[in-house]
Image (spheres, rainbow, N blue to C red):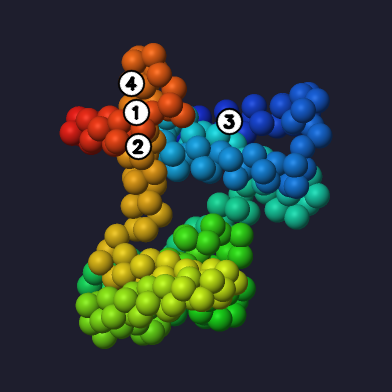
Amino acid sequence: MHTRQEQMEAFGRFLDILDELREKCPWDRKQTNESLRPNTIEETYELCDALMRDDKHDICKELGDVLLHVAFYAKIGSETSDFDIKDVCDRLCEKLIFRHPHVFGDAKAEDAAQVVQNWEQLKLKEKDGNKSVLSGVPAALPSLIKAYRIQDKARNVGFDWEEREQVWEKVKEEIGEFQAEIAHMDKEKAEREFGDVMFSLINAARLYKINPDNALEHTNQKFINRFNYLEEHTIKQGKNLHDMTLQEMDRLWEEAKALGL
C-alpha cells in the first residue's frame, strides 16, 4: 500500500486536474449542483453494484467516480465562497471526533451496537444535528432502505420488540389483513396493507441482522441468472419463449437451479 505522503500527493494532483477541467473544459465549466445531482445518484448506484459483486477493480474505479463528484461539489462551493474541500474535510473530521468519544474522549463503548446507540444521542446534541430521531432519514431514500433506517433509528432509542421472535406474530397479522382486503377487492386498502406486510418483513430482517436490500438484490440476481439460462436454452432449441409451455419452462428453470444459478 502507498504511504500517506503518496496518498496526499495523489489527492493534490486530482484537485489540480479538477481545477483545470473546470476552467478549460466546456462540459465541466457549465456543470451546476443541479445538473450533477442525477449523475451522482447513478455513480452511487454503480458503486453499490460493484460492492455487491465484490469486484475489487470496479470498486476502485467507482470510488474514483464518486470522489470526483464530492470534489466537484466542493469546487462549485468554493466558486461562490460558501465552502471548499478543506471545509468539507474539516467538518467531517470534527463530526468523526465528536461522534467517537470512546476513541477521542473518555466515553466507553463495549461493542458496535453501543457505538450506534451513542451516535443517535450525540446527533441530537450537535449544533446543526437532527431535530428529532427520524429527521435524519433522507426523504429521497428508496422506500425499502428508508423503512430499514426508520426502524433502526427507532431501535437506537429503545423503541423495539423485547424479543425478536415477537415480530412473527406481527408479520402474520399484517399478511392476514392484506388477504382480507384482497378478498374485498379494495385495491387502495390492499395497497396500504401490503405496505404494512413489507414493513413488518423488513423489521423481521433487521431483527435477525439481515440487510433486506442486499437480500432482495441477491434474489433479483438469482432470478436474472435463471431466467437468462431459460431464455438462452429456449433459443438453442430453436424455440421462442412465447411458444414454450409452462412445464417446459419449469424444466429449464430447475436445470438452472440445479447448476447453482
State the separation of the CA atoms marked 2 and 1. 11 Å
Q: Is residue 143 above or below residue 130?
A: above
Mark 2 against mark 3, which lies toward the viewer?
2
User: Earlier along the polypeptide chain: callout 3 or callout 1?
Assistant: 3
Q: Amino acid at mark 3?
A: Phe
Residue 52 image position (x, y, % from top left)? 37, 41
Q: Callout 1 environment at 10 Å: few (<14), some (14 to 19), or many (20+)?
A: many
Q: Position of residue 221 (x, y in %)?
A: 37, 39
Question: Which of the two labelled residues, at mark 2 and mark 1, occupies the earlier sequence position?
Answer: 1
What residue would you read off at disc 1?
A: 230
Image quadrant in which the C terminus is located: top left
Place residue 259 in its image quadrant: top left
- Per the image, the residue denoted by label 3 is 14
Give the quadrant of residue 43.
Answer: top right
Element under disc 4: helix
Question: Considering depth in this image, is 205 or 105 the residue closer to the camera?
Answer: 205
Q: Residues within 10 Å of mark 2 (few under 14, many from 20)?
A: few
Q: Are marks 1 and 4 in contact (CB under 8 Å)?
A: yes
Task: Look at mark 2 in the image and give the residue it sits on.
Answer: 246
- Left or right: residue 61 versus residue 104 is right
Instruction: Give the total number of marks visible in the rendering.
Output: 4
Q: Are the two marked residues, 2 and 1, in contact with CB atoms closer than 8 angstroms? A: no
* Residue designated by label 4: 233
Q: Nearer the viewer, mark 4 or mark 3?
A: 4
SS of the residue under disc 3: helix
